[in-house]
Image: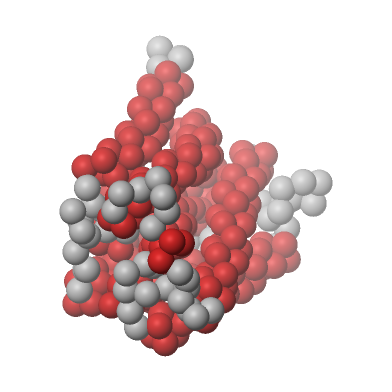
Amino acid sequence: MAEPLALILREQFHAPEQQRETATLGMWIFISTEIMLFGGLFLAFSVYRMYYPQAFIAGSADMNIALGATNTAVLICSSFTMALGVHSAEVGGRKLLNLFLALTMILGAVFLGIKFTEYYLHYLDHRVPGPGFLFPSADPPKAEMFFLLYFIMTGLHALHMFVGEGILFSMILRNRAGSFSAEYHTPVVLAGLYWHFVDVIWVFLFAIFYIEGLHLHKW
Amino acid sequence: MAQPIVSKKTYALTFGTLLGITALTTLLGFIDMGSLNTVVAVGLAGVKACLIAGFFMHGFYESRTVRIAMIAGVAWFLIMISLTLVDYASRFW
C-alpha cells in the first residue's frame, strides 16, 4: 500500500521539489560533519606520517595489498549497485530497487568479511598495538603508531559500513511495504549518499594505508 | 528545478573509470618514485572521490545551495589540514 499523499508532501513545503532539496541539503550538512569526524583522524595520520616517514612507509609495506585492492573493488561495485538502485527508484522499478539494495548489502557484507579476515591476519602477525606488539624494524613504537591509526580509522570506517547495512535493510523493508514510487523516493537517494560517502572515505584509507609503502612490499 | 535522472550509461562509465583508476593506483604503487608515491596515491584517490561525488552522489546535477554544502565540508577540511601541517612542518625551523 502506498503512503498517502499527505505523507509525500509535508505541510511546511510548497512543492515536492523543495521538500526533496531540503532533505538533500540536510544530508549534505550531515556528511560535512562526518568529513570533520574522519578529517580529524586524517589530520592525526598526516602529522605522524610527516614526523615518522620511514616507520609509516614500513608499516604500509606490511599491509596485504591483494586483500586491500580486492576490498576497494568490492566497495566500488557496491557503490555502482547502489547508484543503479537509486536509478530504479527514480523510474519507479520497485522489484529492481529491491534487487539492487540487496546486492549492495551483500557486497557490503563481503567487504566486512575481507576486512575482518585482514584484522585476524594482523592479530596472528602480532600487529595489534599493545603489550604483544611486534614489528621487525629499528623503531617499533613508531610503527605501532601507524597500526594504532590503521585500526582506529579502518575500524571507524567498518562501523559506518555496519550502519550503512542497517540503513539499506530498512530501505528494503520500506520498499517492500510500498513506501517508494517514482514521485517519492528521497530516503533511497539519501541512503545512497551515505553509502557513497563511506566509499569515498575508503578510497582515501586505501591510498594512505596500502599504496604508500607498496614499492617496499616483501613477497 | 526538478533533478534530472542520471542515465545507467553514465553510472556504468563512472564505475569502469573508478575500477581503472584503482588498478592504475595499485600498479603505480609498485614503482619507487620517492615522495611522489604519496602525491600520486592521494591525488588519484582525490580524482576517484570527485567522480563518486559528482556522478554517483549527483554533485554535478544538484542546485547551487546543495553544492555549497558539499564544498563547504571539503573546504574546511583542507583549511584545517593545510594550516596544521604548515605549523608542524615549521616547528623546528
In this picture, residue B73 sits left or right of residue A66: left
Task: Determine if residue A136 is in view.
Answer: no
**Which residue appears at 18% of the width and 53% of the height?**
B1
Task: Determine if residue A46 is in view.
Answer: yes
In this picture, residue A101 sits left or right of residue A84: right
Give percent across and percent down for residue B54. Answer: 25, 56
Which quadrant holds residue B72? top left
Give percent across and percent down for residue A9. Answer: 38, 58
Give percent across and percent down for residue B26. Answer: 35, 64
Q: Nearer the viewer, residue A112 or A181?
A: A181
**Which residue appears at 46% of the width and 82% of the height?**
A98
Furthest residue to the right?
Answer: A131
Which quadrant holds residue A113? bottom right
Q: Nearer the viewer, residue B32 or A107?
A: A107
Is A86 placed above or below A27 here?
A: below
Colouring used for the render: secondary structure
In this picture, residue A158 sits left or right of residue A13: right
Q: Nearer the viewer, residue A90 or A76?
A: A90
Is A143 placed above or below A168 here?
A: above
Is A175 placed above or below A218 here?
A: below
In this picture, residue B60 sits left or right of residue A55: left
Give percent across and percent down for residue A95. Answer: 42, 87
Furthest residue to the top?
Answer: B93
**Which residue appears at 43% of the width and 24% of the height?**
B84
